Amino acid sequence: MPSWDLLADLQLLLEFHFMQNALIVGTLVAVLAGAIGYFVVLRGQSFATHMLSQVGFPGAAAGVLVHTSPAVGLIVFCVAGALGIGWSGRSVGAGRRSEAAAVGSILAFSIALGLLFVRLYAGSAQGIYGFLFGTVLGITDQDVWLTTATTVAGLAVIAVIGRPLLFASVDPDAAEARGVHVRAISILFLILIALSVAELVQVIGTLLIFALLVTPAAAAQRLTSRPGLGLALTIGLSLLVMWGGLAIAYFSLYPVGFFVTSLAFATYLGIRIVKAAA
């Protein structure tokens, strides 16, 4: 149980190696999710991100069914889902209706495939269900290095495409007129989400990654419309809810995902209430 001695609690929190790994990976995940999530909310692609996080389940099930690594199935399904959205979804001047239809269709089909794969698999499906909730408190040193590489690569891509992506997100017609390849940027961004989700879901689960990709960004964009400040606030809020969720879960009997998502939702709700009352 936590005490009023914050220094002692912090030392206790960092005492065990598994918790050190959880905090390192949680920090990396929060930074990457915040950076990507800012653009997800700005572009109105929360539903698409939800779909890409959910196809992790049938992807892992497919990998297990064909006796290969679940990670391979995750990557294949997530990238295929991203390409499906990019191919049949958004185009300049078409609005988001075609994208929403594509996302809904792919999501329904992928979940149905996941249920089929689990039924066809003769062994235990317990490991597959673990992808729904992740294993934040069971992270290995190998997971730390994998998450570090994923985060560095993801942030590098965001740094390269960030300016044209912002332009294409705010005003796609003007961006295309100025020579920005809007459709290519959109597809590349979807693939970035897919690859990040495929790697991070193995550690933190589909439910937690979706909460981190959307809720902090939605809260931050309620506070400011300035891109630089909004991006920084999104990452900051993502870090706070991740650290807070890990700390509370360490001193309780309940799962990390519950506390992280609850803190994120409480932050978003609190900001909306304060802004409405102002």
Image (spheres, helix red, strand yellow):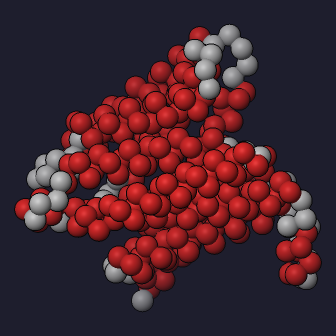
Residue shown at 56%/43% (left/top)?
199
Residue 217's image quarter?
bottom left
Most foreground residue, 253 or 80: 80
Q: Position of residue 115 (x, y in %)?
A: 54, 21
Q: How many numbered marks appear?
A: 0
In the image, residue 21 sits, relative to residue 271, either above or below, namely: above
**Residue 160 visible here:** yes
Left or right? Give the position of 167 relative to 55: left
In the image, residue 14 sits, relative to residue 90, either above or below, namely: below
Q: Quadrant of the N terminus?
A: bottom right
Q: Position of residue 107 (x, y in %)?
A: 41, 34
In the image, residue 240 sits, relative to residue 40, either above or below, namely: below
Residue that extends furthest to the left in the rendered view of this protein:
177
Residue shown at 56%/74% (left/top)?
236
**Residue 219 visible here:** no
Most foreground residue, 4 or 174: 174
Q: Position of residue 183 (x, y in %)?
A: 20, 49
Q: Position of residue 11 (x, y in %)?
A: 89, 73
Residue shown at 44%/60% (left/top)?
156
Left or right? Give the position of 100 relative to 274: left
In the image, residue 226 sits, relative to residue 104, either above or below, namely: below
Residue shown at 73%/62% (left/top)?
23
Q: Quadrant of the C terminus?
A: bottom left
